[in-house]
Amino acid sequence: MDDSLYFGEQHLAVREMVRAFAQTEIAPIAAQYDASSEFPWPTIKRMGDLGLLGVPWPEEMGGAGLDMIAYMITIHELAKVCASHSITVSAHTTLGTSPIVYFGSDEQKRRYVPKLASGSVLGGFGLTEPGAGSDAGGTQTTAVRKNGHYVLNGTKRFITHAGVGEVFVVTAVTDPGKGTKGISSFILTKETVDLAAAKAAGVCHDASLPTLKGFRAGKKEDKLGWRASDTRELIFEDVEVPVENRLGEEGMGFVNFMRTLDAGRIGLAALSLGLAEGAFDASVKYASVRKQFGQAIAGFQGIQFQLSDMATEIEAGRHLMFHAAWLAQHGRPFAKEAAIAKLFCSELAMRATTKAIQVHGGYGYTKDYPVERMFRDAKICEIGEGTSEIQRLVIARHILRELAD
């Protein structure tokens, strides 16, 4: 891809900075944190110091003051080395912070965004429930207004940062008779589950935030991939939430969350593409040094064809992802393009990591090489932020709507 199509000098500088950080500080510890399934507090602290937890937000909000393209570059470069670090940035920024930036009151922005953008706390997004995954309109968590506050009851499932995070935007039903138009969103705060580690790292804890009684994290998921990313339940048991913590008007929660997911799909496309490129780079390197039958396996047509297919699809994915990001950055409609990029890149991540293991042969099936971890990390990309099936539905609806127009 011609870098000048989407990148200016500042974008290239961001890419080099994030790439160097990922290679020197994350690559050496990625396998260790994957194996232990621990949250990588020290490198999260470093990402906060570098401004990577607030890339697209204005400097007056505590962010880096960069744009959507720079943000996607950040996710992309991190994912080449470690998907867990990449999803930490993506979930925190797009899902945890952007709803407050775009739909919050001035007071809510002032109170929460600087803390989130600086990394002094981590944010999360509570939408998925045990019975409401792809059917996000099937939300069962309730919010009943009483005496100047809302009382929330319910459970959210598979929430990134549910344990380590302290600021969450969540959905709950405020008017059961209105379907999706009866769903509202709220900002909730709690203390991180690992206060000692957060304090030791000097990141992700702010004692000034109130701890809402009855709001807590549930069990930590033991996942196939993204193992250094924190994923748990969020549980609400008669949680009293002040009215001023409602995000936007009553009944706008579902609509606003769907808008949030549109942008999130570009981020997951960037992460997926990074995984594919990381697997491709590892395969090229391995094929150039691994010898069989007296020569490097890169000289065999069977290997060359696999590398060629990977390179071709990665190039296509780069255009799809950065095109969707460019549209979003310039205020153009991008929902269809985001779904296309997410669908293509997530399925590409699975194809590319599968080929990478094949190129590595038996070694690719061991934890001695990163492609085994990349393969495990890739699968969730076809599920999170809307499954591949949901993306196809979204794309088809846009196509048919355009035809009708």
Image (cartoon, helix red, strand yellow):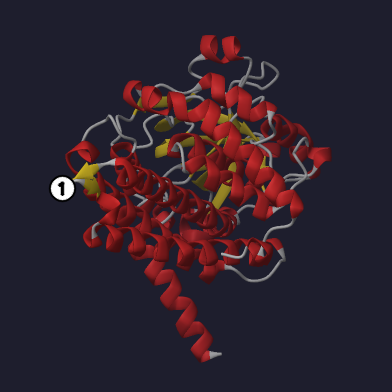
Residue occupying the point 34% across, 36% down: 370
Q: Please indicate, yes or no, whether residue 242 appears anywhere in the rendered image.
A: yes
Report the quarter where the N terminus lies.
bottom right
In the image shown, does 145 or 247 lie closer to the viewer?
A: 247
Nearer the observer, 102 or 46: 46
Q: Mark 1 points at which residue?
A: 293
Q: Quadrant of residue 333?
A: bottom right
What residue is shown at x 44% (from left), y 35% (from top)? 84
Numbered marks: total: 1
**In the current view of this chain or complex, which residue is farthest to the front?**
294
Horizontal side of 337 relative to 217 (left or right) equals: right
Q: Considering depth in this image, is 17 or 146 the residue closer to the camera?
A: 17
Q: Which percent across, then down, holds residue 172?
A: 50, 45
Q: Identify the element where label 1 is drawn.
A: loop
Q: Residue furthest bottom?
A: 404
Q: Is residue 34 left or right of residue 247?
A: left
Reply above or below: 2 against 41: below
Mark 1 surroundings: few (<14), some (14-19) or many (≥20) residues within 10 A = few
Residue at 65 percent across and 21 percent down: it is: 210
Indicate the position of residue 53 as horizontal and vertical percent values.
64, 35
Residue 66's x, y, as percent? 74, 47
Q: Which residue is drawn at 50% across and 29% down?
A: 26
Could you tell whether 98 is left or right of 81 in the image? right
Give the amino acid type for the residue marked by disc 1 in the picture.
Phe
Whether residue 169 appears in this view of the structure is no
x and y, in percent, of residue 353 in the image: 31, 49
Of the 4 image quadrants, the one containing the C terminus is bottom right
